[in-house]
Amino acid sequence: MVARLRRGWIGVYVTTSDYSRNAQEEMVEDQYPIVLIDGRRLAEEVRRMAMDSHGGDLEAFLSDLASGYEEAVTSRRPEEVLSL
């Protein structure tokens, strides 16, 4: 994944679990330009988004999100996404 980043780009690696201490240390030691998002932070962000847009109704938020998924998925190169 890191090898595909171009100069000046930052990667984001999201998991619904957590990262081992070794994985986190490797990112720091090797100075990889990657942000690690673990399951706890992901859950906190989803809950915040549900609160902001659906009054905290998580089920309604996720349903709304899922209903627009097919239309939102596109095949684009990273440089196209970054220039949007």
Image: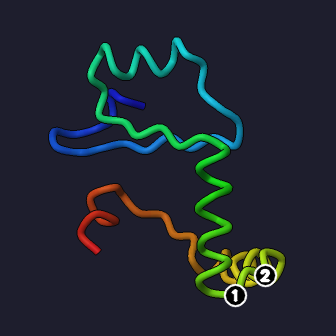
Q: Secondary structure at mark 1?
A: helix
| Identity of the residue drawn at 70% across and 43% down | 16
- Picture coordinates of residue 64 (x, y %)? 73, 84
At horizontal 53% and vertical 43% (from top left) the residue drawn is: 37
Which quadrant does the C terminus fall into?
Answer: bottom left
Q: CA distance from mark 1 to mark 2?
A: 5 Å
Establish if 65 lies above or below 82.
Answer: below
Amino acid at dot 2: Asp
Residue contact at pointers 1 and 2, CB within 8 angstroms: yes
Query: Which color scheme is applied?
Result: rainbow
Where is mark 2, residue-wise? 57
Q: How many labels sit on residues?
A: 2
Query: For this view, does 21 lie left or right of residue 54?
Result: left
Left or right of 17, for residue 42: left
Which residue in the protein does label 1 denote? 54
- Please tell me how crowded label 1 is: few (under 14), some (14-19), or many (20+) other residues with Cα within 10 Å: some
Q: Where is residue 55? Give x, y as percent.
A: 70, 87
Residue at 37% across, 42% down: 11
> Which residue is outermost to the left?
7
Q: Nearer the viewer, residue 68 or 27?
A: 27
